[in-house]
Image: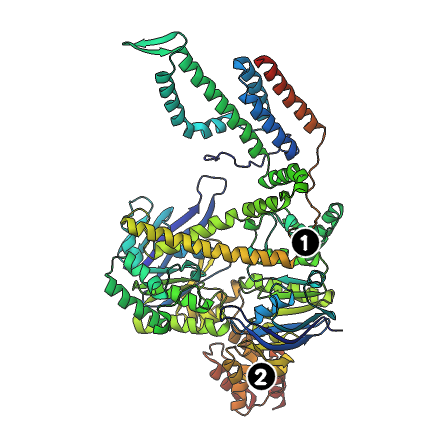
Amino acid sequence: MNPIEVKDLNFSYDQHLDVVKDVSFTVERGSYTTLIGHNGSGKSTIAKLIIGLLEKEQGSILIDGEELNNETVESIRRKIGIVFQNPDNQFIGATVRDDIAFGLENHQVDPKDMDAIIEKYAGEVGMIEYLNHEPTRLSGGQKQRVAIAGILAMKPEILILDEATSMLDPEGKEDINSLVKQLHKENNMTILSITHDVEEVMKSDHVIVMYEGRIVKDGLPSKMMLNEQELVRLKLDAPYSVKLSNELSKLGIKLKNAGNMEGMVDELCQLLLKK
Amino acid sequence: MNNIALGRYLPLDSIVHKMDPRYKLVAMLVLMVAIFFPSGYIGYAIIGSFVLFSLLLAKLNIKMILRAMKPMLFMLVFLTFVNTLVLRTGYVLIDLFGFKVYSDAIFQTLYITIRLLLMIMVTTILTASTKPLDLTLAIEDLFSPLKRFGFPAHEIAMMISIALRFIPTLIDETNRIMKAQASRGVDLKEGTFKEKIMAILSLIVPLFVSSFQRAEELADAMEARGYIPSAKRTRYKQLKHTMKDWVMMFCVICVLGSVIWISL
Amino acid sequence: MPIAFEKVNYIYAPKTPFQYEALKCIDLAIELNKITAIIGPTGSGKSTLVQHLNALLVPTDGTVYILDRELSSNQKNKDLKSLRQRVGLVFQFPEYQLFEETILKDVMFGPLNFKMTEEDARQKSMTALTMVGLDESFYERSPLDISGGQKRRVAIAGILAINPDVLVLDEPTAGLDPQGAKSMMELFVELNRKYKKTILIVTHDMDHVLNYCDNVVVMKKGEVITHQQVNDFFFKGDTVKEIEMALPQRLRVVESLREKGFKLDSKISNLKDLANAIKKEISHE
């Protein structure tokens, strides 16, 4: 059973922006899947549909084999945690401690147990020293860490990141990316990351590319992200390694590892030694 | 700490700060009732000494409160003026070329001033020693018996606490929009009436738009984390009362009792 | 007179417990008619620095010289409006400052505040909208119903319509997708080359610094650590490594190839040259 299975999903807003047309895809258990597309391609809409913040028009969404509908939405939300884009607008509590407690209160955890849970997950995201800090005294990256701690405390199986790093500075981005990577590896969480960052895509297990509401590519990043012209047509940027290998192939140097910078550097190195 | 506004929380370490906000809130209400009893100067002396004692316990500065009273000075002057004109009972205190100032006028004013001062002191002790959020929790707890009759105690408390959480964020936002519009030539000090209206609109409309967006995103985030307004939830912050809260309650009731006794 | 900072200090909320020294003794001269990047970690004082340029902030100590104006705390700084007409400042996420019913009206708001005639304002606004790549079909639409990237363009047009000589932008590409960011940066290059605007850009993106900017100012903890030409900054000396910021992609590739024994000149200005240099190495030409 796959954690996320989406079939023939359709959705349109009253306005014209961000529609979703005939979208079908599967996210495998324990995978790090990235969803990429230009602004307004419908990728964030998909995240909201999956956790039932928006109601689909047609199609089906299965989470762990359970069909999402009005009856199941509450139990499905327990399985999925989502980190949104704006760090400020998802910080609910007055302090870090209160914010992590918010989800626990919703799940009717006994207040006596909360402190231990809060401290455990604040520790896991490296925010234990900031438990009594107010949000105004935290950086964007720190607020996103707190958001992640709040989600982890509810023990979901799936973590969705909806452009969670796009408003952060490079330091905050790096911070959150490495935290997510660690959660993926150590806790074996299924990750669905909605992103603009091609370099993050290249490091993921699976990429889904969206363009104007439809899925146009779905598969291994090292295979899907190689055609530079096509990516530009989809209003995306090609990974730097792909750009370089394209330039090199024009000069007659064909490389196997175009999608992976380290692999490409090694390959070039072997060529250098061979001659 | 030059410009402490009235009603602001001061993070000090005192016994009053550690008291249960529910008891503090009730105590404040009881003292307010006591202040409204016409108990004369002896009554006010009792209330006053209790309030001063609490002020000391809370490690608050009397000067600070007096300074906060400054804006009310004008009102008091005005009150004195009206009272001297209107109240013509008691004995004559001053006779200025036939214009007589009666004793009751002065005493009435003094009376009102003392009441006002006491009321401000009582509320300041509460707000300065209690975090706004704890006050919200206290309100929620005190009103929770009314839940049975459909009174949305929890929802109101949640709304207040979110409003409190977003005040600093919105202040930052307002500053930013003001600066952005100043860069587009907005000048709130100069200009015609029409230009001023436009200037205000250029501030308010963006503030509304972004607040609505924030509200929407916040609602999404809350819902995604399993919040359902009408559903049962537990509460992390449990308010606990201890011996000191009972002692305070006892003292406050004694104050009220003696005031009532005096005014009978 | 160029743009210069002379021993500028700026303190937020002075003489309170919240006192915070955001700028410490800044000495800096910005070249006119160039694109200057201002980089540095969050909280290094970049935003505070640029707000001095159109006198939204006045130095606590020291003097700021902007064009023919002089700003310091010990003199009355009158008529700041005329300065703001010549130095346009675009804030971070400027799409949140739009408020008018139509896009054209919103862009005209600035020019009208600066006492241009209605006709002149309309003309300037149309030109500005063309500059940012929005055609007539947008004029009568509401600024609230267009995409995020387009909103940002409208907001930038709102400053361009004032026709400032100096354009200052605080993280103009934050939150845009890569293509949106690229065309935004290309717009600034065009404004600089074609319309001779002096441009300052606060950014976190080192690739943008390398690819689009002439000069770079690096800030850290309220101080200017270095101010150099972009080429010198990346290719001469070690400042770029000392500041602990991620290198642009091209330089990272060059670095890792050099570590593996490639003899590459670090001063390779584009992708094509890099490919050529690699080929040269491999085929031992």
| x and y percentages locating residue A132 in the rendered image | 63, 46
> What chain letter is assigned to the residue under label 1?
A
Residue count near mark 2 (Cα–Cα under 10 Å), binned few <14, some 14–19, many ≥20: some
Indicate whether B93 appears above or below B127: above
Indicate whether C149 appears above or below C27: below
Label 2: state its secondary structure.
Answer: loop
| x and y percentages locating residue C283 in the rendered image | 55, 91
Question: Colour scheme in the image?
Answer: rainbow
> What chain letter is assigned to the residue under label 2?
A
Q: Residue at x 52, y 14 (%)?
A: B40
Q: Residue at x 64, y 38 (%)?
A: B143
Q: CA distance from mark 2 to mark 1?
A: 42 Å
| x and y percentages locating residue C146 in the rendered image | 44, 68
Disc on the earlier residue, 2 or 1:
1
| x and y percentages locating residue C236 in the rendered image | 46, 70
Indicate whether C203 appears above or below C59: below
Q: Quadrant of residue A264?
A: bottom right
Q: Residue at x 39, y 59 (%)?
A: C99
Q: State the residue position of label 1.
A: A103
Q: State the residue position of label 2.
A: A226
| Image marks 2 and 1: residues in contact by CB distance under 8 Å | no
Indicate whether C17 appears above or below C274: above
> Does any portion of residue C253 appear in the rendered image?
yes
The amino acid beneath tag 1 is Gly
